[in-house]
Image (spheres, rainbow, N blue to C red):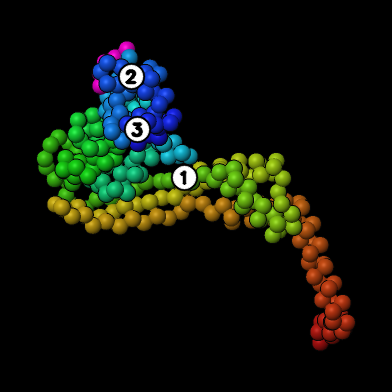
Amino acid sequence: MAEMFGDKNNNGIPDIIEKKYEPDGSYRQGQFNVFYDEMGQISGYYDIDDDKLKLPLVWTVDKTTGQPNAMGPGGLADPDVAKQELQIWYENDTPEWKIIRKDYLEMGVTGRTPEEVDAKIYRLVSDGIDFTQVPGSGITDPYDYTNTKSGMEIMEGSSRGGGGGSYGPYSYESTDVALSSDSGAMEILDQTYQQYLGRVATTEEGQAFKQALNMMEQMNPSRSVIEGVSGKGTDTRTQTTEGGFNPRIFARDYAMATPEYANTFAANTFMTALNSFLEEPNAIEQRIEGINA
């Protein structure tokens, strides 16, 4: 649930909101009238221009804070807006939909074809959004709908209509692209430059490397194949992942392709040979004798 703000009074309600108490028991918070439970958590809200009660729905979450970041109070989402966004993501196979698909595949959603899998996931999420708005449902996150009886029936059965099993062998393939961040790319390049060039990378070099690295990562996604056999109440499957891109090998080749590396390599090789000759005065004569033998 979203984090509250302001000091709380004995009822768990933030003091900053307590002063805006409404006759229906809600508290005015911006453009919303918000209801709180005895623990000070949001239990429902409605827009001041629309008296339709909305129950808590966690739709999108900020990866940095872990808190909901939709437009409703406390970062909660409007269920109608969430359904609209879901349809757009599903119809256009957007990056947001790919994330949802990956999550539900890991939860065990299967099907005879990729299209059936996507349709089943869409129904799970859509029904999950609706279920959060049922009083007493006990869930605020559509993902939790998979733990309900209806959700499990969708996961085990066919995505077309009600009833009917989707049993037998299945195979599903997905690709994933993992892009290195600014800090991650810079760390890899620094370590590589220190090893091969004897120095750390500049900010400009780090930016150029990240662009090249991200391009190669996009061109070389990892490929996962999920195969199994689905039966009534059982699902045996294996997942094989191959490919992908190794940024450290790319960084090594990237550093070795620079003119600076050639000079550094030549200097290091010469100095290593010179030091060995200085430490062993007879090394040159022994080398010549070995050649003439």
Residue sticking out furthest to the left: 163
The disc label shown at residue 287, or none: none
Q: Give percent across and percent down for residue 227.
A: 28, 54
SS for tag 1?
Answer: loop
Say above or below: 57 vs 17. below
Find disc 3 in the rendering and name its residue. Answer: 10
Of 23 and 253, the residue lying toward us: 23
Between circles 2 and 1, the one closer to the viewer is: 2
**Sequence-earlier tag: 2 or 3:** 3
Disc 1 marks a residue whose amino acid type is Val
**Amino acid type at mark 3:** Asn
Bounds of the magenta segment:
49-53
Q: Secondary structure at mark 2?
A: loop
Name the residue rendered at 84%, 81% in the picture: 280
The one of 210 and 285 positioned closer to us in this rendering: 210
Q: Residue at x 33, y 41 (%)?
A: 101
Q: Which mark is residue 177?
A: 1
Looking at the rendered structure, the kind of residue marked 2 is: Tyr
Q: Which mark is residue 21?
A: 2
Tell me how far mark 3 sits from mark 1, CA to CA. Answer: 49 Å
